[in-house]
Amino acid sequence: MSLNEYTSLSEFDKEIVISKTANSFMQNGADFTIKTMNELPGIIERINSLISDGKRPRTN
Amino acid sequence: MDWAGTAVDFGCFAPVNVFVDIFKNAGLEVTMEEARAPMGMLKIDHIRAMLTMPRISSLWREEYGRSFNEEDVEKLYAEFEPALMMSLADYTDPIPGVIETVEALRNRGLKIGSTTGYTDTMMDVVVSNALKKGNQPDFHVTPDATHSIGRPYPYMIYRNMEELKLSASWKVVKVGDTISDMQEGVNAGVWSVGVIVGSSEMG
């Protein structure tokens, strides 16, 4: 899907493709999914705090 | 961090149309979904993975009266590579948010490595064009550096860890836009993060 195709989707349709894609990542071993790269620093903070608690990948 | 579909080329379009075209030239109509399913693998492995799909395998048998073999894979790849190279430079725009995020992470002291399903020849085009547009990780590697063993194997991530002097896989985060990216991360023992908007997996 191109950026134009994506931005022209209704909010409802965006949520559908986002949740479908997120499920597919999670089923294939993702620890987290993010909508855009802007959310990555926040996720990395969360991972840092999980690591401090002794957690490791795939144990979340 | 992955490249196409994650850092550049919103929707990972550069390879998709070429996969559809080379199969069409071979007399097989494949869908965009089929062309996207193995995305992220080394491109010759991607072609083999498509041919292995039951529907495409049976289309092949109808067309040629026999199962596909490794020679067929190599012939298709020989068409794929030059066709991709023709258009690759046009698909190097940064995906929104990437440049700012990389900069923010770097300012916090993180190292930014990268892996890909492209070869060195392809990455020469992607990296030089991406750089002009402000996109520059600290290191990039292709399966050419890992005996052509790409995703879902973890070795490209290990080349990055070595180069960037990272001490443990559980302190590494892998970000990508495909199933094979997630598998690479799992196999490497790193944290795997799937980025959705602009991904190949979104279709």
Image: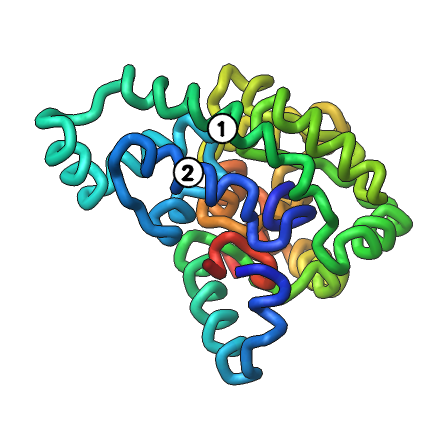
Looking at the rendered structure, which numbered label has been put on residue B34?
none
- Residue B143, x across and y down, in percent: 55, 24
Q: Earlier in the sequence, mark 1 or mark 2?
A: 2
**Vertical relation: B32 (above or below) B68:** below
Q: How crowded is mark 1: few (under 14 residues within 10 Å), some or many (20 or more)?
A: many
Query: Dividing the picture into quarters, in which one does residue B168 lie?
Result: top right
Report the residue marked by disc 2. B19
The percent position of residue A9, horizontal first and vertical second, equals: 55, 77
Residue occupying the point 56% across, 18% down: B144
Q: What element carries label 2?
A: helix
Residue B78 at least partly seen: yes
Label 2: how many Cα within 10 Å (few below 14, some 14–19, many 20+)? many
- Number of marks in the rendered image: 2
Q: Given the image, on which type of amino acid does mark 2 rest? A: Phe
Q: Please report, as a chain letter, where disc 1 is located.
A: B
Is there any visible trace of residue A52 in the rendered image? no
Position of residue A7 relative to residue B19, above or below, is: below
- The front one of A50 and B143 is B143
Q: Nearer the viewer, mark 1 or mark 2?
A: 2
Return the x and y of residue B169 as percentages of the image width and height. Answer: 62, 38
B4 vs B94, left or right, is left
Find disc 1 in the rendering and name its residue: B150
| Badge 2: chain ID | B
Identify the residue at horizontal 85%, vertical 44% (top origin). B134
